[in-house]
Image (cartoon, helix red, strand yellow):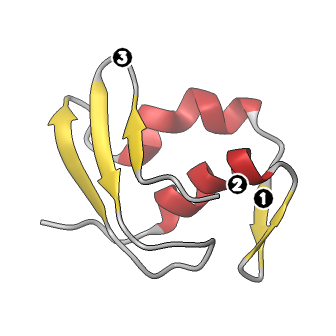
Amino acid sequence: MTAVEVVTPTDRYGVSGSGYGLVGKVHRAAGSSETIEQAVLPYLIASDAALVDGKVDGDPTEGALPRATRLPRGS
């Protein structure tokens, strides 16, 4: 599972790359949050998934968000 777009009530981000590795970038498409971490914080708190050595420990869908927060930011 890979997040390719993160949409919240106030923000939208595009996410490139695939799998759970840290290859890819995050691009803010719209919104007011300075970082994707701020935009998805409520979802991360509610999730019990973690990335361990490039693999998800927990629900694969929930593992897509921690990966997105660790990617470098695009321009």
Residue 62: image location, x then y, percent = 71, 45
Task: Report the side of 10 relative to 2 (left or right).
Answer: left
Q: Quadrant of the C terminus?
A: bottom left
> Where 7 sits versus 69, above or below?
above
Cα distance, mark 1 to mark 3?
A: 24 Å
> Where 29 sits versus 42, above or below?
below
Quarter occupied by residue 56: bottom right
Q: Residue at x 50, y 66 (%)?
A: 70
Residue for badge 2: 63
* Numbered disc 2: secondary structure: helix
Q: Residue at x 33, y 69 (%)?
A: 25
Amino acid type at mark 2:
Gly
Amino acid type at mark 1:
Ala
Is mark 1 in CB contact (under 8 Å) with mark 2? yes
If you read the primary sequence from the N terminus, does the residue marked by circle 1 or circle 3 appear first? 3
Which numbered disc, 1 or 2, marks the residue closer to the eye? 2
Residue for badge 1: 50
Cα distance, mark 3 to mark 2?
A: 21 Å
Residue 28: image location, x then y, percent = 22, 48
* Numbered disc 1: secondary structure: strand
Task: Report the side of 27 relative to 47 (left or right).
Answer: left
